[in-house]
Amino acid sequence: MRRIAISVAASTMILSLAGCGVLDATGDGASASPTKGDDVTVGLLLPEKANTRYDKFDYPIIKAKVSELTRKKGTVRYANADADAARQAGQMQTMIDDKVDVILLDAVDSHGIVGEVKKAKEAGIPVIAYDRLAEGPIDAYISFDNELVGEVQGRTLLEALGSGVDTSDKVVMVNGSPTDPNAKQFKQGAVSELNGKVDIAKSYDTPDWKPENAQAYMTKVIAEIGKDNIAAVYAANDGMAGGVIKALTAAGVTKLPPITGQDAELDAVQRIVAGEQFMSVYKSYPDEAQAAAQMAVTKVQGKDIQFDALTQDRVDSPTDKDIPSRLVQVSALTRGKIKDTVIADGIYSVGDICTAKYKAACASIGLK
């Protein structure tokens, strides 16, 4: 069952607690966690490099926030698995052996990592699932509202098709990796919007989220149903949207159909400016990453009241129920919303987006 985030309530509670001077309280003795000072070591395991957000945003934001929360005494031990589940298992085992204080885990394979999650639990190391819901005895979970992501993608795609959309319009779905539980939620959300309104002609789960896999699949679909018979393409993220566009362009398509994405990568934002990609889903990485750092530090320091304020949602995994969670909201990013999202939040500047190649397109939508 999907749970909607109440981030405003959580923020209000934290401010209220700070005002009462009890922010560092650990609750009663029966429920209090073991406490630690500011010399916290946070293990951060991120899943891949094909999506540039992990190295560019998540890691540096988490590192900076941990430093801030611990008066520059805390450290972040970082490893990226580059889409290799076995490598990530080894990286996590190393962190367990090195006795880090807490682990933020963004799993390559949410099911395959269960053994290492159990080992961390046995070693007394809390594990917080970050961005993707790992299975096993995790202590908490933080991500975006993933089903809402798919709903936003599907709804915006229908808006792009216009009032004349009908069930004969063929939509191709290029979904995320089958080992990523988020991908299943994205797909469910999108299908809930598209079902009965268009013809979902083809649907494909893309191994490892790789753009080259998406491109190869799209090339095959074009050969099977014809380049002129594709009304729109649901691509689960921006990298794969790029692969889809390459396949369509290589097939001689000059007027691209509406194509979705996710993550607001710089290349994708520029494609949106140029009219090549219709939309992306903007997710505030600073909000997610900073909250994850807060959850990790407060958990290991035994600040139970603050931790509870940060995790007021509940989600279920295939192995555990009622996991303390925080779900961050998302929004559609189209040409008209670039100023209010990635520019307003300082993710990119106008100069980052409006390079020489995109200067004219930027000017046409008021980006100067």
Image: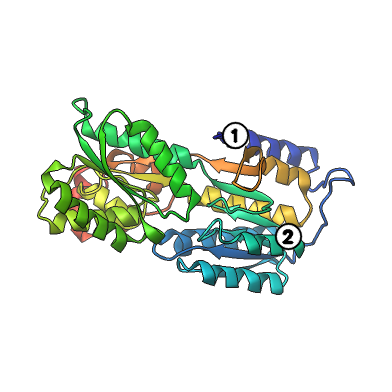
User: For this view, does 219 lie left or right of residue 334?
Assistant: left
The part of the image, by quadrant, that contains residue 215 is bottom left
The part of the image, by quadrant, that contains residue 330 is top left
Residue placed at 33% from the left, 31% from the top?
Answer: 195
Tell which of 14 and 134 is nearer to you: 134
Is residue 275 placed above or below 355 in the rendered structure? above
Residue placed at 67% from the left, 40% from the top?
Answer: 322
What is the image's colouring?
rainbow
Q: CA distance from mark 2 to mark 1?
A: 28 Å
Q: Residue furthest right?
A: 29
User: For this view, does 228 lie left or right of residue 176?
Assistant: left
User: For this view, does 294 lie left or right of residue 166?
Assistant: right
Indicate the position of residue 328 as horizontal and vertical percent values: 53, 42
Residue denoted by label 1:
6
Q: Residue furthest front?
A: 224
Q: Which dot marks residue 220?
A: none
Q: Which dot marks residue 121?
A: 2
Residue placed at 16% from the left, 46% from the top?
Answer: 225
The secondary element bearing badge 1 is classed as loop
Amino acid of disc 1: Ile
Indicate the position of residue 63 as horizontal and vertical percent values: 59, 63
> Label 1 neighbourhood size at 10 Å, few (<14), some (14-19), many (20+)?
some
Q: Is residue 344 visible?
A: no
Which of marks 1 and 2 precedes in the sequence?
1
